[in-house]
Amino acid sequence: MVKKFIYLGLIVVVLCGCSYSVYSNVYPHLKKVAIRPFENRSTEFELGDIIYNGLVRQFQKDGRLKLVTQQPDCVVEGTILKWEEDVYSYDSWNNVQDYMLKLTCSVVFTDLINNQIIYENKNLVLTEPYAVSSASTAKSRNKEEAIDELVSQLFKNIIQNSLETW
């Protein structure tokens, strides 16, 4: 009989634990988000589409806000101001080992229900190195991985400065 109560207690604890989430939302009235394509002022033609599609994937994966195209509660907008790709490091024979990608953008997260800007950064700079040599210690093994990481950094920056603001 005691074992039944212990098992029942364990089941209740497990089920209650399943509903717990580490995500927070300081603005509980925000349920739906629209992501506008970023204006691209850089020389990297496809970068606007890459960032837009990456942010869409990140918001879908996160799940706190439902992605919509009509009647959103909030909107993410931005402008790609600058894109740079420079040599970051050399090996002992003076061969390029790593490149550094640098994305400079302006981003705005707006609450459309209360008509207020929740987060704005007019000069957000994100960087990520990537490897071109096997001796590299860069986390990203190629340019595509580095771009994906930059999009992930952008998403985290937006979320941490808007929905997770304390």
Image (cartoon, helix red, strand yellow):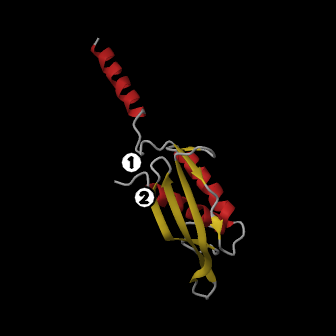
Work out whether 14 lies above or below 157: above
Q: Residue furthest left?
A: 2
Q: Is residue 115 left or right of residue 93?
A: left
- Marked residue nearer the N-terminal end (2 or 1): 1
Residue name at image x 69 percent, y 75 percent: 43
Looking at the rendered structure, the secondary structure element under dot 2 is loop
Name the residue located 63 percent from the left edge and 75 percent from the top edge: 133
Q: Which residue is mark 1?
A: 26
Residue situated in front as seen by the camera: 126 or 143: 126
Taking the view exactly as shown, the residue that stands out farthest to the top is: 1
Q: Position of residue 114 (x, y in %)?
A: 44, 49
Q: Residue furthest right?
A: 45
Give the left or right position of residue 48, taking residue 92 as reference. right
- Residue 63: image x %, image y %? 52, 43
**Number of numbered markers:** 2
Give amino acid for label 1.
Val
Q: Which residue is mark 2?
A: 161
Do tag 2 and tag 1 residues touch (Cβ < 8 Å)?
A: no
